[in-house]
Image (spheres, grey):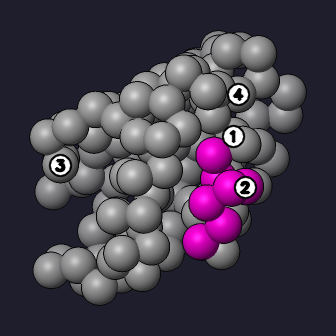
Amino acid sequence: MEVKKLIASWIAAANAYDKDQYLRFYLPDAILDDPSVGRKFAGHKGIGNYFDSYFIGYNTQTALVDVVIADETHVHVEVAFTGDFPEGNIGGTFDITFKEGKIAFARADLIH
């Protein structure tokens, strides 16, 4: 698994608002925990709702800032978000755990 390429493709799917492609990066039972919105999203249905609300709903575009690979299954991703949300431009992070070449767990947060 080439992690940096996978992360770039994941972000590209998000920026294209291609929900089906975006969800293919996640295991069916993956968890996305986003303390900045105060919720955890479970499975493709929950993560799809998150994507609809916070990416499509706010016309969010994501720029990759940095990828730090901790080991074969853990990566820290720093991004910059722009969109139709109050801040207009804000930094964010994803701490991702991979299993079987897909995202098993992601913790998303905003950089204030």
Q: Quadrant of residue 12?
A: bottom right
Assign the magenta stretch its main secondary structure: helix
Residue at the (65%, 74%) spot, across then down: 16
The residues bearing labels 2 and 3 have C-alpha atoms spaced at a distance of 23 Å
Residue at the (72%, 42%) spot, across then down: 24
User: The residue under label 4 is which amino acid type?
Assistant: Lys
Would you name the residue on which mark 1 appears?
Answer: 25
Stretch of the chain drawn in magenta: 17-23
Would you name the residue on which mark 4 appears?
Answer: 102
User: The residue under label 1 is which amino acid type?
Assistant: Phe
Dot 4 surroundings within 10 Å: few (below 14), some, or many (20 or more)? some
CB-based contact (under 8 Å), mark 4 and mark 1 = yes
Q: Residue 83, image x and y in percent?
A: 36, 81
Would you name the residue on which mark 3 appears?
Answer: 37
Left or right of residue 82: residue 24 = right
Dot label at residue 17:
none
Would you name the residue on which mark 2 appears?
Answer: 21
Residue at the (52%, 58%) spot, across then down: 65
Q: Secondary structure at mark 1?
A: loop
* Residue reaching furthest to the right: 1
The residues bearing labels 3 and 1 have C-alpha atoms spaced at a distance of 22 Å
User: The residue under label 3 is which amino acid type?
Assistant: Val
The residues bearing labels 2 and 1 have C-alpha atoms spaced at a distance of 7 Å
Tell me, yes or no, if residue 100 can be seen here. yes
Residue at the (42%, 64%) spot, across then down: 52
Q: Earlier in the sequence, mark 2 or mark 3?
A: 2
